[in-house]
Amino acid sequence: MSHKQVVMAGTDTRDLTKLAEYEAVGGYASLAKARTLGPEQITNELMASELRGRGGAFFPTGRKWSFVPSPEQNPNPHYLVINADESEPGSFKDNEIISRVPHRFIEGCLITAHAVLAKHVYVYIRGEYLGPYEILVAALEELKQRPDLRGDVTIVVHRGAGAYICGEETALLDSLEGKRGQPRTKPPFPAIAGLYASPTVVNNVETIATVPAIVEMGGAEYAKLGVPNSRGTRLISVSGHVERGGNYEVEPGISLKDLIFAPELGGGVPGGRAVKAVIPGGSSTVILTGDELDVGYDFDSLLAKNTAMGSAGVIVLDERVCMVQLGIRVSEFYEHESCGKCTPCREGTRWMTQILRKLEAGEATERELDLLLSVCDRINGKCLCPLGDTAAMAIASYVAKFRDEFVAHLDGGACPCGDHSPLDGVLAPVAQHIHDHASELVPA
Ligand SMILES: Cc1cc2nc3c(=O)[nH]c(=O)nc-3n(C[C@H](O)[C@H](O)[C@H](O)COP(=O)(O)O)c2cc1C
Ligand code: SF4
């Protein structure tokens, strides 16, 4: 099976981290073309491309840009902010884009800045991404010598301090302004009142790195790739119990089974073990069982299964995994990362973890299993931002789809998997998200 490359095109044969190499494959030609077009024309091409945001919310990119008010409507400066915070467990594609095609990403920033009339671009990059950060800074150093490319746009790279919630666009803006990173109430949306209360477009790294190709080939041509509602290509992070973990650029619509088993993609499960479950779009998404793999990897097909592509992190879990232990690992992450602004999420995620720990120890009652679902229900739909909702939906889906296994923990008075439940390489334990700052222990 061959796969069309758009974002990662050229990386197999050249080192595209170098400006000269990137220009040798036609790099920055789209920027030159874009500068001959008016901002509105570029936005129209984006609309025609049907590109939707790659950060998780899947909002149509051209439409988002079209919301930015004209200077006559709002004379404040316009800002472009790139979300490179990528902290969703299971997702590591933006890391690879910045590391391998930094100039394509920068070209996308400059084209987008032209389209939304921004002279200031901020790249908010996950603090732990030191490698990509250094590659990006080196690429920007090269750009400094090229005022013909840079024009009058400044690009500032800001390193985050390690909070998952700062990937949520309004928390990111607060963090960028020097405040504590917590989500704002919406509306107003950032396009109207974002950074410093000025019109701001926030886009994901992959979204922006796709823009040069759309300008080059035209929106209509790009929209021929993929399937309805999921156009173009997506860079998918495949991890967990697969032979060939990594990022793969494919057209949406490919089957989830192929993503996991095709020899040039996931390459199957080590040891020929069966797939027990798959988390399709990063830890925030509803789980699929091993019987549900014959599904297209695209927005509509996954929605029909009540789940989502999210940030395109496919996490494969083989037959040895204990779903309660998985629940603890995921719940601990959200408990730790909850910003605490709203009660259902702050208290509910901790409560979920506590019940799951009791279940794993074989000390819970059937009433507490029902209580776990009730807590999920009381979080879902009652939060300021999607962190709480998605945490609750994910955990509730483990119980709904693997209830027998949860009940076996009650009946047996212990974890039925014993020590045969390897989560190694599946999702990092929460301890790896905790930084070495002294902090007070809060009593449970
Ligand atoms: C808790 C949370 C974390 C998020 N983390 C990220 C992230 O790391 N990167 C990202 O691009 N979007 C993230 N998002 C989505 C952003 O809020 C926003 O939708 C996105 O950056 C918009 O860019 P796009 O339209 O190009 O996808 C997150 C959302 C939530 C609720
Ligand atoms: S849902 Fe959670 S992370 Fe989001 S604002 Fe509320 S407390 Fe903060």
Image (cartoon, rainbow, N blue to C red):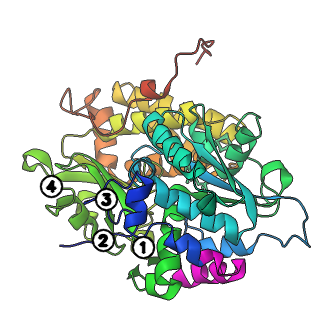
> Element at badge 1?
helix
Report the side of 59 relative to 213 (left or right).
Answer: right
Q: Is residue 328 magenta?
A: no
The answer to whether any part of residue 341 appears in the image is yes
Q: Which quadrant contains ligand 2?
A: top right
- Residue 223 seen in this snapshot: no
Q: Is residue 268 left or right of residue 115?
A: left
Mark 2–mark 3 contact, CB under 8 Å? no
Dot in front, 2 or 1 = 2
Residue depicted at x 56% and y 57%: 204
Residue that appears at 60% across and 71% down = 61
Tell me whether circle 3 and circle 1 mark residues in contact (CB < 8 Å). Answer: no
Estimate the x, y position of residue 123 in percent, counting from the top left. 61, 48
Q: Can you tell which mark lies on residue 268?
A: 4
Taking depth in this image into account, of 300 and 343 the one nearest to the observer is 300
Mark 2 Cα shell of 10 Å, populated few (<14), some (14-19), many (≥20): some
Q: Are marks 1 and 4 in contact (CB under 8 Å)?
A: no
Q: Nearer the viewer, mark 1 or mark 4?
A: 4
CA–CA distance in space, label 2 to label 3: 29 Å
Q: CA distance from mark 2 to mark 1?
A: 9 Å
The residue singled out by tag 2 in the image is 295
Residues drawn in magenta: 34-50
Q: Is residue 379 above or below residue 428?
A: below
Q: For the residue marked with disc 1, what is the amino acid?
A: Ala
- What amino acid is found at the position of numbered circle 2 in the picture? Val
| Residue position marked by numbered label 1 in the rendering | 304
Q: Which element is circle 2 on?
A: loop
